Image (tube, rainbow, N blue to C red):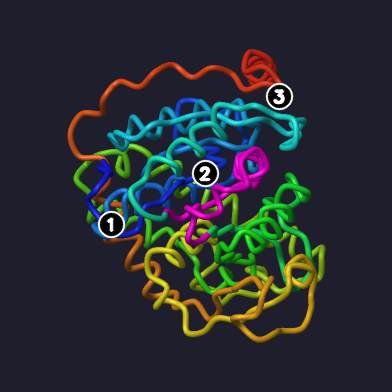
Amino acid sequence: GALAGRGQIQVVLDVDLAIMSPAWGASLGLDLDDSLALAMLSTLPQVDILSLTATHGNTLATLACRNVHAVAQELNLTVPVACGGGYYSDYRTAATEAAALITKTTREAEGSVVWLGLGSATNFAEALHRDPTLAGKVSKVALMGTRFDRGWDLNRWADPAAFDFVMRAGRQGGMEVQVTPAEVCLPVVLTVPDIDSLVAHGKGGWITKYSFFLKLYSYLQFRFTSLFMSLEGAPGTIDAPPRFRGGSHPWDVVAAVSVAFPSAFARTTCHTVEDVAQLGPETACGEDGVVAVPRSADAEVILSLLIGHASIAGPGQPEEVAEPTEPEDDLALSDINRIGEEL
């Protein structure tokens, strides 16, 4: 697992993990990328995962909460885990365990930390709203989300007010703010042969156990993403070469690599907060209030990092983790299980 003090980049990680756990069947989530990003980060020697929190986005917060606990156990992570609010929560009035853990971890860390958000920005927004001085301890907040080509993305859509608040308040507080838009991830495609390579490089642990579901969801995500983007009229995997058909974009892996290996991106552009949420002009980097966007992702490098590191995550027997409590302002897990049974 990831042990504090092992690396140079201290990461507070917030995810909307939808599959790769006993709750995967009920979640109906199509994202395998949160799990892969978490697995990859957990084995990188330069990264310390200080805490792990669950948010909503690709699935309900209730399910993301249970999934995060289950995957943390699969990967043998020894970091604190907490759950955040659901789709009906308001970061301005919420009081979640996730925001409390983000605050505690950030405050107690030796030196600065990086906030990495791979789902909605609700938990980070709550923590920053309740304690604006946290910005002084956060060197960078990196968010996966938004789209420059059409302005729509699930992570921002899940809580646009929170997403925009984190960008604005972060910049005002002196944080470096980075956003990885969806189209930056389009050159990176995880195919079935890539998943076979993950299994071949693995140690017979979680990656082998879930290889079938990785392939199934990779195929389904390709079909879903291609259809959705073609209906929008946006460029996407629908026009991908034959070799890429049947693959998926590991969105969150790309965002994670942008933090751990920024050299995997050939350039960076800068934009105002307003222009990050919609197509807009570039502005000079280094100016007050601008948001950085990594560009020109090297797909081969990113997939090599993923295959080389995610495959070896979680050696040994996982430790027991506490049973999670259901977040407030969300559907009950029993309701989701009942719906799944009825279907």
**Which residue is rendered at x = 51% and y = 38% of the image?**
103
Q: Amino acid at mark 3?
A: Asp
Q: Crowding near pointer 3: few (<14 within 10 Å), some, many (20+)?
A: some
Q: Nearer the viewer, residue 91 or 64?
A: 91
Mark 3 or mark 2, earlier in chain: 2
Please give the residue where the numbered disc 3 appears in the rendered image: 330
**Which residue is rendered at x = 35% and y = 60% of the image?**
306
Name the element at disc 2: strand
Tell whether 283 sits left or right of 111: right
Mark 3 or mark 1, earlier in chain: 1
Q: Is 95 placed above or below 224 here?
A: above
Residue 78: percent from left, percent from top: 29, 33
The CA distance from mark 3 to mark 1 is 34 Å
Whether the residues at callouts 3 and 2 have beta carbons within 8 Å, the answer is no
Tell whether 279 sits left or right of 258: right
Mark 1 or mark 2, earlier in chain: 2
Name the element at disc 3: loop
Residues shaded magenta: 113-140
Q: Crowding near pointer 2: few (<14 within 10 Å), some, many (20+)?
A: many
Name the element at disc 1: loop
Please give the residue where the numbered disc 2 appears in the rendered image: 14
Q: Quadrant of the C terminus?
A: top right
Q: Amino acid at mark 1?
A: Leu
Q: Quadrant of residue 341?
A: top right
Please give the residue where the numbered disc 1 appears in the rendered image: 44
Q: Nearer the viewer, residue 72 or 218?
A: 72
Residue 157: percent from left, percent from top: 76, 50
Q: Is residue 280 visible?
A: yes
Q: Is residue 248 visible?
A: no
Tell whether 149 sits left or right of 46: right
